[in-house]
Amino acid sequence: MEEKIPASFTLLEETLSQQIRALYTSQLGHSPQKVICNLLDKTLTILVEHAMTPPERLLIESGKHDLVEEVRWNLCKAIEPHLKAIIEAVVKVPVVDLIGTSNIDSDRTSITAVLAAKPQ
């Protein structure tokens, strides 16, 4: 039997998507095409589509793939405290761990936040 997603989770997911997109815009100067958040129990998954900034695209076009991967990693680390603060403010539960990865070829970033408890 399929478990029904609480309406409160849907509202949290929408709020998180909007605030994370705003974070990318304010901190990186680039608005991703789409930010999708899914909350399941104590796990929040975030998919950021078209997350690559214009300077990263320029580096890719110049054949600097390795440099883009390094820049992307450093950018993710730089916004991590802001991302954690947004998540904790919205779900009202501490974040225990943030795990992220980016795929330069597909221009997607995936982040998993492990929460201390299931949001209410």
Image (cartoon, helix red, strand yellow):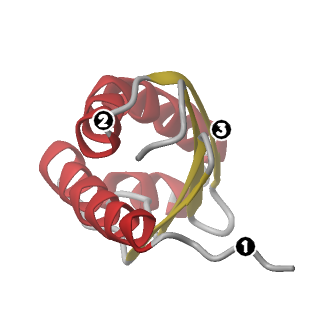
Residue 53 is drawn in which quadrant? bottom left
Looking at the picture, tell me which residue is in the foreground, 21 or 106.
Answer: 21
Nearer mark to the viewer, of 1 and 3: 1
Q: Position of residue 120 (x, y in %)?
A: 41, 47
Please give left or right for residue 22 compared with residue 10 in the image: left
Query: Is the residue under label 3 in contact with that under label 1 (CB below 8 Å)?
Result: no
Q: Residue at x 21, y 49 (%)?
A: 23
Type of amino acid at the residue the image marks with label 1: Glu
Type of amino acid at the residue the image marks with label 3: Asp
Query: Where does label 1 land, which residue?
Result: 3
Mark earlier in primary sequence (2, 3): 3
> Please, is residue 57 above or below residue 87 in the view?
below
Looking at the picture, tell me which residue is in the foreground, 8 or 78.
Answer: 8
Residue 69 is drawn in which quadrant? top right
> Could you tell me how far apart the alpha carbons at marks 2 and 3 are, in whole angstroms?
37 Å
Query: Where does label 3 land, which residue?
Result: 66
Q: Position of residue 51 (x, y in %)?
A: 43, 61
